[in-house]
Amino acid sequence: IGERVYRAIARLAIAPPLPFSYFEYDTACNWIPAKRIINVIKGRGIKPVMLVDVGANNSQIAKWLVREWKGLDVISFEPSPKFNPIGKVFRMALSDVDCHMAFKTLGGDSHIIDPVAESGDTTVRVARFDSLGIKITGPAILKVDAENVTDKVLIGFGDELHKFDIIHVEMWNCFHFVQFRNQQAEIWELMLAKGFRNGVCVYAESGVDGILWYDMMYYK
C-alpha cells in the first residue's frame, strides 16, 4: 500500500479519536512514551505548570502533555527552522558553553555535530540555559533530546536543575552511530550529584544491534 494510506491506517490505530491534526503521524506515534511519561508524573503526585523542552522538534511529546494538563507553560528550544514547536520558542541550541557551533539540518536527525565524525550544513547559536535568565515556575518538567550533547545540555543548566521536579532525557546506547556519542555514565553521574536519585525507563527503541536508545525519567 502507499505511504499515505499506511500512515492513515497507523494514525487511526495509534491515537483515536484523532486529538491532533489527522496527518500528525509523528505525534501519534509518540502516544505510548507520552502516556508512560504522564503516568510517572501523576504517580509522583505532580501537576506540572511548566515544561522546558530542549530539542523540541515538532513538540511530539509536549502536545500530549499540554492535552493532559491544560494551560501548561511550554518553553521550546529548537534551532532548526524546519521544525515548528509549540509554546515560547527559542531558535537556539543549548550546551555547557555560550558560542556558535556547526549544526546539521539535512537528513532525519538535526543536531550539533562532532567535527571528527561528520560535517554540518549551517551554524547555530549555542547557550547555557543558566545564562538566559529564564524563570522556572514549579512544578516543572525538563525534557532533553539533544542527541550527542545531552549531557552537556544538562551541565549548562547549572543549579537551575534543582528547580525541576522531573527530568526526562533520551540516552543513546548505540555505538555504531559514530556521530551520536554515548553519554550514559556522564548523565547518570550528573543526575546523582544533583540529587536525582530515582529513575525509571519509560521507553526503549531496539534494532539489530540491541537497544539503540532509551528514555529515562529522573526524580528526587
Image (spheres, rainbow, N blue to C red):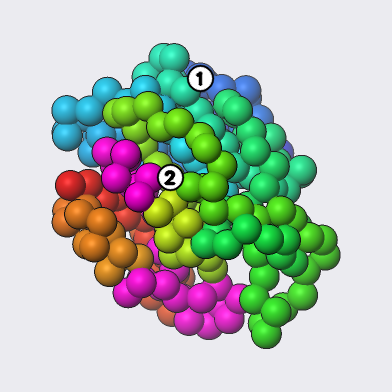
Give the mark nearest the N terminus, 1 or 2.
1
Quick one: 20 or 173, which is closer to the camera?
173
**Dot 1: element:** loop
**Residue 84, disc:** none
Q: CA distance from mark 1 to mark 2?
A: 22 Å
Identify which amino acid the numbered label 1 is placed on: Pro
- Eye-nearest disc, 1 or 2: 2
Left or right: 19 as drawn, with respect to 142: right
Left or right: 7 as drawn, with respect to 147: right
Q: 85 above or below 97? A: above
Q: 75 above or below 204? A: above
Residue located 26% across and 51% down the image = 218
Residue 45 lies in quadrant = top left
Identify which amino acid the numbered label 2 is placed on: Lys
Residue located 41% across and 14% down the image = 70
Left or right: 182 as drawn, with respect to 127: left
Count of marks placed on residues? 2
Structural crowding at the residue carrying mark 1, measured as other residues with C-alpha within 10 Å and reported as few (<14), some (14–19) or many (≥20): few
- Membership of 116 in magenta stretch: no
Q: Which residue is mark 2?
A: 143
Q: Which residue is mark 1?
A: 19
Report whether residue 145 is seen. yes
Image x and y of residue 209, in percent: 43, 79
Q: Are marks 1 and 2 in contact (CB under 8 Å)?
A: no
Q: 50 above or below 177? A: above
Residue located 31% across and 64% down the image = 190
Residue located 52% across and 62% down the image = 96
What range is drawn magenta here? 159-186
Quick one: 106 or 49, which is closer to the camera?
49
- Membership of 180 in magenta stretch: yes
